[in-house]
Image (spheres, coloured by chain):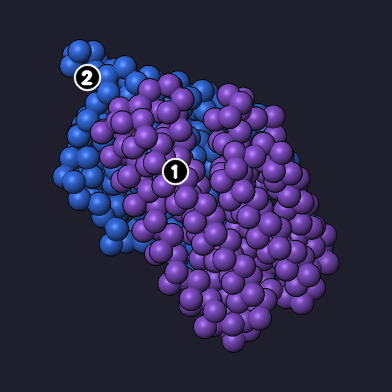
Chain colours: A purple, B blue
């Protein structure tokens, strides 16, 4: 029985890593679609989100089945429950990539991002890719050090998010309200994407160490 | 053993209803703080969020303890897992109320909401109160009809959200970028608050009927 349990748990862990890969690919393509006003690429991101949703449903069904059949307790139980929470974070990250792609689609054939913000948004996309890849490594390797490095990527994302708001709020924004609204939403989607990646990593750290890091407030949207 | 299980489950259900009450009170006060530029009220909402977070942790600990001690299967298991998902939605609703309060605090002594949007935002606050109260009734009474009525409140919230965006996007917005950015974020917080209430109600319907309503896409942020 123990072997079956751990085989199932390994399968769940593999699926979580696969979800990080899909969410990372989605956000990477969404960033390109946004900056290059690439309608076709945006459409592929929007369509592919169903794949992440399906994987999440499959994972959760497997987890519930595992709880029912194997009745784990203590650490084993905590691992299954935590896996379901991580699948929820990762599914949401897929949604956020889809949201970015939808902004790109809405403004086609223009780019939703004004040239003055292009390099900042490009960097947000790169940080998003980096942070979700690290989340995958943390899940696969139960790697506490990567989890800490990932928090620094999140700080970087918060800095970029503030940069966007500073550009909008310094009283000199002259590129119109529509561009400001798009930038506000897109910037928030990237920032939330990173928050969920941090949340995934913290859950792994919690499983390994029993310590939950609540020192840093994740969702600092009141900028 | 069965009685203990159902007593514990009743207690969890009571805590979920209490969370809807707290989230509703928070959003109601946040709306007043926002519209009246009431710093003190905003601070009380921000401080009170910890109460919702604590309730969520208590509820989740109780649920995990229940899984470990009672090892429920089938519908009983599904109810416990669903309760944990609802607590996550409700905790997030508390966060969103806190976000609205933080926007109010940031712009004090001004109101973040321009007078032209005041009535729309007031209505968003009223719909938010209504929808979370219905979510509480749905949890307490496993009431499928209220769950359906609640979907109509969500449609109303989406309509108000579109109204805000139409005001910003019609090319005639002349009240500055800062006010536009604030309105964008605040409107999204209300819309997401309603989405989570719908999600709570749908989870109850799923428990009762086994049917998951995915026909309507909840998070339609690409407006």
Between A134 and A128, the one nearer to me in the picture:
A134
**Residue A18: percent from the left, percent from the top?**
49, 56
Crowdedness of circle 2 by 10 Å Cα count: few (<14), some, many (20+)? few
On the same chain, marks 1 and 2? The answer is no
From mark 1 to mark 2, how far is it between C-alphas? 33 Å
Q: Disc 1, disc 2: CB below 8 Å?
A: no
Q: Circle 1 — which element? A: helix
Residue at screen point 39% across, 64% down: A50
Nearest to the eye among marks 1 and 2: give it: 1
In this view, the residue farthest toward the bottom is A109
Q: Quadrant of the N terminus of chain A?
A: top left
Q: Which mark is residue B6?
A: 2
**Residue A192: percent from the left, percent from the top?**
60, 51
Left or right placement of residue B150 versus residue B40 in this view:
left
- Judging from the image, mark 1 belongs to the subunit labelled A
Residue at screen point 52% across, 52% down: A17
Left or right placement of residue B45 versus residue B78 in this view:
right
Left or right placement of residue A14 versus residue A146 in this view:
left
- Judging from the image, mark 2 belongs to the subunit labelled B
Residue position for label 1? A10
**Residue A120: percent from the left, percent from the top?**
77, 65
Crowdedness of circle 1 by 10 Å Cα count: few (<14), some, many (20+)? few
Corner quadrant of residue B60 = top left
Question: Is any atom of residue A129 visible in this view?
Answer: yes
Q: Circle 2 — which element? A: helix
Between B211 and B2, the one nearer to me in the picture:
B2
Above or below, comparing residue B179 to residue B2 in the picture: below
Residue at screen point 20% across, 50% down: B211
Question: Is any atom of residue B107 visible in this view?
Answer: no
């Amino acid at each position: 029985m123990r072997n079956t349990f751990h085989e199932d748990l390994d399968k769940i862990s593999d699926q979580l890593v696969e979800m990080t890969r899909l969410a990372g690919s989605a956000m990477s393509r969404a960033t390109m679609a946004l900056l290059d006003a690439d309608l076709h690429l945006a459409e592929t991101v929007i369509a592919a989100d169903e794949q992440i949703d399906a994987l999440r449903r499959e994972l959760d069904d497997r987890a519930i089945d595992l709880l029912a059949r194997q009745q784990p307790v203590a650490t084993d139980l905590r691992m299954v429950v935590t896996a379901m929470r991580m699948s929820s974070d990762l599914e949401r990250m897929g949604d956020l990539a889809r949201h970015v792609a939808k902004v790109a689609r809405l403004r086609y054939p223009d780019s939703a991002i004004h040239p003055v913000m292009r390099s900042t948004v490009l960097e947000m996309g790169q940080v998003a890719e980096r942070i979700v890849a690290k989340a995958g490594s943390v899940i696969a390797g139960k790697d506490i050090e990567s989890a800490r490095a990932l928090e620094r990527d999140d700080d970087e994302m918060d800095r970029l998010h503030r940069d966007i708001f500073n550009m909008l709020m310094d009283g000199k924004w002259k590129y119109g309200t529509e561009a400001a609204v798009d930038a506000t939403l897109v910037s928030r989607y990237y920032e939330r994407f990173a928050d969920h990646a941090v949340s995934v990593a913290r859950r792994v750290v919690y499983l390994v160490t029993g310590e939950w890091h609540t020192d840093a407030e994740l969702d600092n949207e009141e900028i």
